[in-house]
Image (cartoon, rainbow, N blue to C red):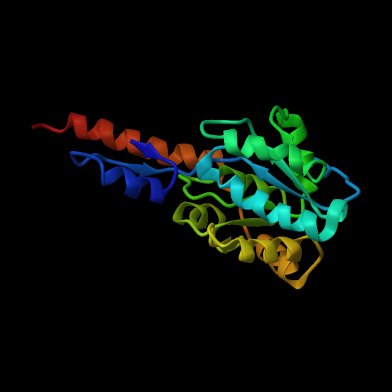
């Protein structure tokens, strides 16, 4: 059995009725070198399906305050992802946030790279994640990350992102305002990011191959 993180492995093994070999093989990443998008106002990207566990409600609460304080001069929020299960409440709120919050449900892959590279940071305030692919996509693009303090996200991001409590809107708001400018806090993450290395597909498949070889050899042993 192959899983994408040690956090997923722990969650899985608690539910298995018998002992099975489990290999942790983080997903790899191949990104094309692209120029960042340009925009008149600083913007942030939240990448992922709109559903309750992704905690978009926290971001809308923050942007409601930002809109009240700064009007249309507030930094923008781009929600990249389709609406999923339980998204009705979030969808109902979105019209009231235009133009500072924009939904991009059908953004093609070729447009995501430049958009992500131009962002001040990726925002991922999820309540639960099994791997956190947007984290490594952002870091591999040279973009800082503000994300929830979850075991899977600490694995994928190592010590680079700022890890925040997904229930503390005040902490997130302060961080977002810091990252909207070239603050010391943002510069510190960019310095950490310079030492980060993206996971590779060849490493992923090397782990999978070792698992398959071990299973094959075990079947050949006399019983």
Residue 79 figure quarter = top right
Front residue (pair 173, 41): 173
Q: Is residue 198 above or below residue 82?
A: below
Q: Nearer the viewer, residue 89 or 81?
A: 89
Q: Residue drawn 67% across and 60% down?
A: 193
Res 111 seen here: yes
Q: Residue furthest bottom?
A: 184
Question: Residue 133 placed where, x, y %?
Answer: 57, 43
Out of 169 and 48, give the one closest to the viewer: 169
Residue 180, x across and y down, in percent: 79, 60
Is 209 on the left-hand or right-hand side of 192? left
Answer yes or no: is residue 139 visible: no
- In the image, taking residue 32 as reference, residue 36 lies left or right, namely right
Q: Quadrant of the C terminus?
A: top left
Identity of the residue furthest to the right in this view: 40
Residue occupying image coordinates x 49% and y 55%: 155
Residue 156's spot in the image, x, y percent? 53, 52
Q: Number of callouts in the render?
A: 0
Where does the N terminus fall, quadrant-wise?
top left
Res. 116 image quadrant:
top right
Counting from the top left corner in percent of width and height, residue 127 is at 49, 50
Quick check: 51 left or right of 31?
A: left
Q: Nearer the viewer, residue 57 or 18?
A: 57
Residue closest to the far left: 223
Asked where in the image residue 120 lies, by quadrant, the reply is bottom right
């Amino acid at each position: 059995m192959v899983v994408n993180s040690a956090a997923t492995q722990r969650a899985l093994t608690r539910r298995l009725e018998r002992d099975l070999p489990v290999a942790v093989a983080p997903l790899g990443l191949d990104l094309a070198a692209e120029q960042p998008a340009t925009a008149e106002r600083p913007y942030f990207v939240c990448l992922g399906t709109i559903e309750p566990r992704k905690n978009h409600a926290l971001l809308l609460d923050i942007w409601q305050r930002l809109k009240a304080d700064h009007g249309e001069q507030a930094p923008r929020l781009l929600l990249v992802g389709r609406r999923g299960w339980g998204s009705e409440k979030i969808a109902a709120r979105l019209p009231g946030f235009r133009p500072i919050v924009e939904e991009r449900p059908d953004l093609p892959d070729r447009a995501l790279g430049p958009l992500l590279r131009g962002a001040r940071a990726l925002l991922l305030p999820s309540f639960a994640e099994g791997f956190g692919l947007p984290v490594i996509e952002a870091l591999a693009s040279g973009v800082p990350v503000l994300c929830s303090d979850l075991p899977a996200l600490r694995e994928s991001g190592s010590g680079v992102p700022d890890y925040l409590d997904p229930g503390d809107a005040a902490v997130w708001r302060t961080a977002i305002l810091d990252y909207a400018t070239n603050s010391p806090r943002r510069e510190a993450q960019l310095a950490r990011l310079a030492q980060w290395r993206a996971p590779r597909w060849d490493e992923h498949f090397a782990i999978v191959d070792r698992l398959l070889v071990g299973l094959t050899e075990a079947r050949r042993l006399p019983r």
